[in-house]
Image (tube, coloured by chain):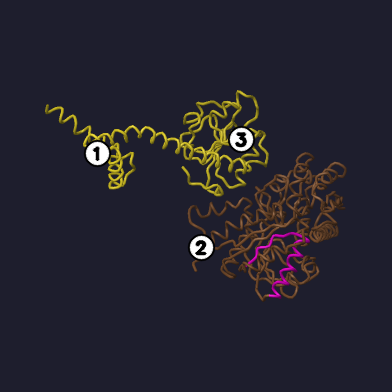
Amino acid sequence: MKRSIDIGILQSQSGNYAALSVISRAGLLRGVAEVNASPDYDLCFRVCGRDPEGRTDRYAPLCREILRETGARHIFGCVTSSSRKEVIPELERFDGVLWYPLPYEGFEASERVAYLHSCPNQHLLPLLDWALPALGRRGYLVGSNYIWGWEIAQIARERIAALGGEVAGDRYLALGDCDSSHIINEIAALQPDFILNSLVGESDYAFLSQLRDLRDRTGARLQVLSCNFTECEIESSQGGAEGLIAAGPWFEPGEGRGGSIAEVARRSVHELARLLHGRPGAERLSLADLLRDAPGAARSRLDPTHFHAAQPVVIAQIREGRFHEILRHAPRAADPYLTARDRDLPSAPILRVVS
Amino acid sequence: MTRLRTENLGNALAFVLHRPHPAIQGLTRQLRVIGLELREVWPDLPAEAISADFIFYDADTGHDEQFPWAPGASPMPMIALIGSEAPGRLNWALTMGAHAQLLKPVSDKGVYAALLVARANYDRARASDALIADLEDRLSARQTVVQAVMIFVLRGKSEAEAYELLRQTAMAWRVTIEIAAARLVANHRAESPGKEDRK
């Protein structure tokens, strides 16, 4: 007989990043169905879902609603960092835990958040380290006008400079803004060796398709790199994503799993199930205790200090509508504040490209 | 003491001067997460704390004698851990030289910001101190410059020629005008008593 544990799902079913949140929710539900059907777990999950409709100010009240009005204490959800930062005070006040299955920009380590996707030392830095020698040293940065876009650009600027490259320009678009003609004109004039694209959602798809038109007109390569573009968005960008190179922990070799956002979401449900299996009442523990006292079989990919998952690094390119792996690194620990390098290499300068 | 850049915290050493208490568990956790080496000490900072990159200190029960340096003279950024926001304690924390502060109980938020703010404030204060010391030196050197010019004037130069000679001398010696003036005055004094002895 399986014990039943309530969990929350806080993912938007509409709004300008719905492509991501809908697929993330589908992956979570799939994970729940697998856990509930599996004889390997002595528990099943009952889902209490809420839909913030892609509106940042809906996340905190709905998070509170889950924590106060349902039996759920563990909530899976959020896509943008802004929404994650909205719910953290609610988690603190009402003793909740957020399982966050999307890539983010780092520089956070809440005691109430399990970070299950990747942070910059697992996506952005290896991507740039590969890109500069392979593509050239002049980069152009474009991103959504909020913390993800800003911080990715900030870290990229530092890394590109350290690798001996230069940033030809950087521009930001509001979430949902689909007019990127001024950016396209600037890219046409500057002809960068690569474009690091941190746009999210609808404006991303519009930008990619306008960039494809520019490519078709001029024959320029204009290689796009991304740390947030995934399988579920290929169709939305109307062929604009062809050739795009992305970094992440996993890319779907074929079809059927709904892409990497769904897959990481699905795995994160299993992660919690493994940690709770055979431990009645463990769902009331703090994340720190849940991880620290986990029996050997449930040993988590989550770091017991900062609760970020160790991840492999995969760099892959979209060809004919599918990701093809270019490069793979073994799983590496997350380094949310990018300080591990300082410890490993006390005073040595980081790699410099000599051309 | 400045082996640390703002963004480079991975090698940094922090001393936490606070009695063991749940109110600072969040601080020690975040410092470890961010990647600093951490030493918790109480009731006094040991002499080796002088090699630390950051000092976190208790503003509630702290006092001057805990520190191996004079109030306000810490050779690194200091972050006050404030529980009671009473003017007397805040005044003491500021006199000790707080470059940033954290409120107790310290949560998982604010520690990284406090490190960067403290570092920036400390660097700015040090740069200002160095500038002030330099300006004070120059101010007191002005009198010496006038004396050096007078030496040349006594030897028959006009004031303009005397200044030009002083400038050329400084260039030839590859020193500042103030240092050249001080040497000229010292030489002149060394020569003068000798003449007086012979009289």
Which span is picked out in magenta?
A: A194-217
Q: Quadrant of the C terminus of chain B?
A: top left
The answer to whether residue A39 is seen in the rendering is no
Please tell me whether residue A214 belongs to the stretch shown in magenta: yes
Near-viewer residue (A208 or A250) = A208
The amino acid on which the numbered mark 3 sits, given as a three-letter code, is Gln
Colour of the chain lettered A: brown
Label 1 packing within 10 angstroms: few (<14), some (14-19), many (20+): some
The amino acid on which the numbered mark 2 sits, given as a three-letter code, is Arg
Residue B103: image quadrant is: top right
The amino acid on which the numbered mark 1 sits, given as a three-letter code, is Lys
Q: CA distance from mark 2 to mark 1?
A: 59 Å
* Residue linked to disc 3: B101
* Residue linked to disc 2: A352
Label 2 packing within 10 angstroms: few (<14), some (14-19), many (20+): few
| Residue B6 x %, y % | 55, 47
Viewed as shown, does residue B59 lie left or right of A252?
left
Badge 1 and badge 3 both on one subunit:
yes
The answer to whether residue B83 is seen in the rendering is yes
Viewed as shown, does residue B150 lie left or right of A294?
left
Per the image, label 3 sits on a secondary structure element best described as strand
Please tell me whether residue B189 belongs to the stretch shown in magenta: no
* Residue linked to disc 1: B157
| Residue A175 x %, y % | 76, 56
Residue B89: image quadrant is: top right
| Residue A109 x %, y % | 67, 47
Tell me which residue sits at (69%, 73%) in the image.
A215
The answer to whether the residue labelled 2 contacts the one labelled 1, judged by CB atoms less than 8 Å apart, is: no
Per the image, label 1 sits on a secondary structure element best described as loop
Which numbered disc flags the more N-terminal residue, 1 or 3?
A: 3
